[in-house]
Image (spheres, rainbow, N blue to C red):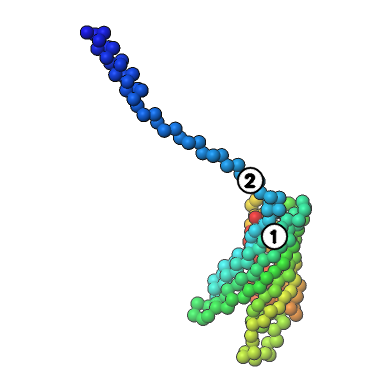
């Protein structure tokens, strides 16, 4: 009796094992090989200047930049745009904008020199060339350009990438160029402070 019971149990177990549905095999996911970026894409640099202020009036500067690294010595050349909004809370604001071309050269570790030419569309009273005797009704928006030259340094990452701070001098001063609200040492200062990043 015992042998019959043991044989029957083994037969049932064997039958159950064969009768079980096979677990579906997981399909192997195709392996996608990451395509290396073309060499020219590796040399692209993106970034810009950022500034936000609430001193007497609301002020925001968002100035994007895109550059291309030329050679192995840390030279980056490119173009960008200046987008500045200024206004009091009880009055309409003023939008100032314009394109710029720039060249940046790494000189020692995280220190760089920077040159640019900016064109700005702003009210005539926002340029060094403004004549204070102009009647208020004649103050209209216009285009004017000037070169800037300066130096700065990258913070954090080292090398020629990362967040940066720089001081720029408006070479059009005192006859031409946009009077930046980021002027160091007064409203009509030709020295401009810049904060931003370039990656």
Residue 191 sits in quarter: bottom right
Looking at the picture, tell me which residue is in the foreground, 130 or 72: 72
Number of on-image labels: 2
Secondary-structure class at tag 1: strand
Decide: few, some or many residues near mark 1? Use Cα within 10 Å; few <14, some 14-19, many ≥20.
Answer: many
What residue occupies the far left of the structure in this picture? Answer: 1
| Left/right of residue 111 with respect to residue 9 in the rendered view | right
| Left/right of residue 168 with respect to residue 29 in the rendered view | right
**In the image, is residue 197 above or below residue 129?**
above
Residue 92's spot in the image, x, y percent? Answer: 53, 80
Decide: few, some or many residues near mark 2? Use Cα within 10 Å; few <14, some 14-19, many ≥20.
Answer: few
| Identity of the residue drawn at 62% across and 75% down | 96
| Identity of the residue drawn at 49% across and 80% down | 90
| Identity of the residue drawn at 74% across and 74% down | 146
**Which label belongs to residue 94?**
none
Give the residue at mark 1.
67
Secondary-structure class at tag 2: loop
| Left/right of residue 174 with respect to residue 9 in the rendered view | right
Give the residue at mark 2.
35
| Separation (CA) of disc 2 from disc 1 | 23 Å
Image quadrant holding the C terminus, namely: bottom right
């Amino acid at each position: 009796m015992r042998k019959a019971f043991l044989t029957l149990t083994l037969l049932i177990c064997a039958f159950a094992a064969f009768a079980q549905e096979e677990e579906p095999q997981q399909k192997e996911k195709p392996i996608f090989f990451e395509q290396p970026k073309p060499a020219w894409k590796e040399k692209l640099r993106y970034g810009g200047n950022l500034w936000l202020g609430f001193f007497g009036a609301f002020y925001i500067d968002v100035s994007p930049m895109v550059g291309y690294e030329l050679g192995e010595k840390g030279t980056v050349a490119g173009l960008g745009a200046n987008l500045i909004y200024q206004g009091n809370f009880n009055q309409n604001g003023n939008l100032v904008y314009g394109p710029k071309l720039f060249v940046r050269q790494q000189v020692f570790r995280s220190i760089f020199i920077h040159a640019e030419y900016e064109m700005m569309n702003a009210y005539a009273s926002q340029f060094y060339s403004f004549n204070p005797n102009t009647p208020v009704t004649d103050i209209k928006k216009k285009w004017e350009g000037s070169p800037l030259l300066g130096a700065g340094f990258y913070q954090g990452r080292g090398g020629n990438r990362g967040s940066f701070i720089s001081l720029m001098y408006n070479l059009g001063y005192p006859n031409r160029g946009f009077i930046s609200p980021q002027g160091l040492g007064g409203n009509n200062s030709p020295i401009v402070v810049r904060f931003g990043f370039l990656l």
